[in-house]
Image (cartoon, rainbow, N blue to C red):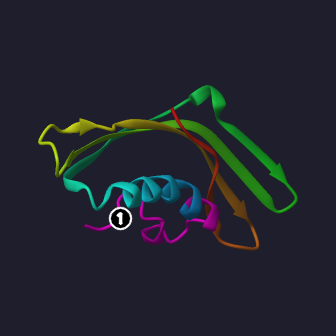
């Protein structure tokens, strides 16, 4: 079985912060269970953005936009020693920040990821 979770490598404008914080937790959990797994299912359920958290700032040549979100995932797995599927669904709070520098490219980063 392969790793699961967000594949930040498929997001060309993602920063290293996004790659490390979003995938690390799920990869560690998978590594601890992979030898015991019989099967697993995962689905992205959606994302809610808090419009009251939206901020736009401009300083020098840089524009910053940030918004707080909650991303929901349905996740279940079955262990080899039991056939009952375990529900490990979760929500993750993420602040997305888009940075535009008039002299550089657009970058995407993530601040304060938490599982709720």
Q: Which residues are magenta?
A: 1-18
The answer to whether residue 114 is above or below residue 23 is: above
Is 34 situated left or right of 9 in this image?
Answer: left
Residue 9: x %, y % from top left: 46, 71
Residue highlighted by disc 1: 3
Crowding near the residue tagged with mark 1, few <14, some 14–19, many ≥20 C-alpha atoms within 10 Å:
some
Residue 48: x %, y % from top left: 45, 33
Residue at 81% x, 50% y: name it.
Answer: 58
- Name the one closer to the observer, 111 or 100: 111
Image quarter for residue 5?
Answer: bottom left
The answer to whether residue 47 is above or below residue 102 is: above
Residue at 67% x, 47% y: name it.
Answer: 65
Considering every residue shown, the one lying at the far front of the view is: 81
Residue 15 within the magenta-colored segment of the rendering: yes
Q: Is residue 52 visible?
A: yes
The answer to whether residue 106 is above or below residue 115 is: below
Considering every residue shown, the one lying at the far left of the view is: 83
Q: Is residue 5 visible?
A: no
- Name the one closer to the observer, 24 or 97: 24
């Amino acid at each position: 079985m392969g790793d699961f979770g967000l594949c930040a490598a498929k997001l060309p404008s993602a920063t290293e912060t996004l790659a490390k914080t979003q995938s690390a937790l799920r990869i560690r959990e998978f590594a601890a269970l992979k030898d015991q797994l019989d099967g697993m299912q995962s689905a992205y359920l959606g994302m809610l953005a808090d419009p009251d958290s939206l901020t736009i700032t401009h300083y020098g040549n840089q524009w910053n936009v940030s918004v707080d979100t909650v991303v929901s995932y349905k996740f279940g797995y079955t262990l080899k020693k039991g056939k009952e599927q375990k529900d490990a669904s979760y929500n993750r709070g993420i602040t997305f920040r888009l940075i535009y520098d008039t002299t550089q490219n657009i970058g995407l980063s993530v601040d304060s990821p938490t599982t709720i």
